[in-house]
Image: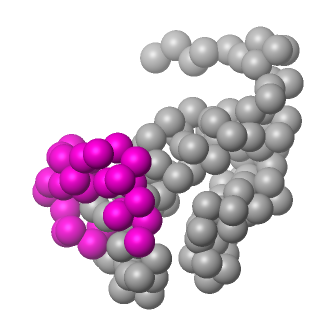
């Protein structure tokens, strides 16, 4: 696999992808404090493990994919159970935005539990939107 090398211009466009800016955007889009904190713990661990530049590139490249840490179905179901109202509200918003039912939006996740599919849909869509918002 060939790894794309970011140019200086590309790297400069990622400077706004910071943990603080990501957390602020989560609040702006309607994530409650507890849900945002749970996601931030995952993001902070990745940031600490890989460093700022690699984290910024990884976050930007998520592009409608779920972070590896949230692929554990049982973990994600627990997140749903703690934040079901928020997740359901976000799913309804995504259905309005895309004019597609959530089941169609998560067709590639058919083999996992409905709760996990919904959390993964919300997280992948919203983190990707945050990444795009934070680009210069």
Judging depth in this view, the residue of 19 and 96 nearest the camera is 96
Q: Residue at x 22, y 53 (%)?
A: 101
Q: Residue at x 57, y 44 (%)?
A: 129
119 left or right of 113 in image: right
Judging depth in this view, the residue of 95 and 116 nearest the camera is 95
Q: Is residue 44 visible?
A: no
What residue range appears in magenta?
89-116
Q: Is residue 129 visible?
A: yes
The part of the image, by quadrant, that contains residue 116 is: bottom left
Residue 35 lies, with reference to residue 68, above or below; the image says below
Q: Position of residue 70 (x, y in %)?
A: 44, 61
Judging depth in this view, the residue of 3 and 10 nearest the camera is 10
Q: Position of residue 82 (x, y in %)?
A: 44, 87
Q: Residue 23 in magenta?
A: no
Q: How is the image coloured?
A: one colour
Residue 39 lies, with reference to residue 128, above or below; the image says below
The part of the image, by quadrant, that contains residue 38 is: bottom right
């Amino acid at each position: 696999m060939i790894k794309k090398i970011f140019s200086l211009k590309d790297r400069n466009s990622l400077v706004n992808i910071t943990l603080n800016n990501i957390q602020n955007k989560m609040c702006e889009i309607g994530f409650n404090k507890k849900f945002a904190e749970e996601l931030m713990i995952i993001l902070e661990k990745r940031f600490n493990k890989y460093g700022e530049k690699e984290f910024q590139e990884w976050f930007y490249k998520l592009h409608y994919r779920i972070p590896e840490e949230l692929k554990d179905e049982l973990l994600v179901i627990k997140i749903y159970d703690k934040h079901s109202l928020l997740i359901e509200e976000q799913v309804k918003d995504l259905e309005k935005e895309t004019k597609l039912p959530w089941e169609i939006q998560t067709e590639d996740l058919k083999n996992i539990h409905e709760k996990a599919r919904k959390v993964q849909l919300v997280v992948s869509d919203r983190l990707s939107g945050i990444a795009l918002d934070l680009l210069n």
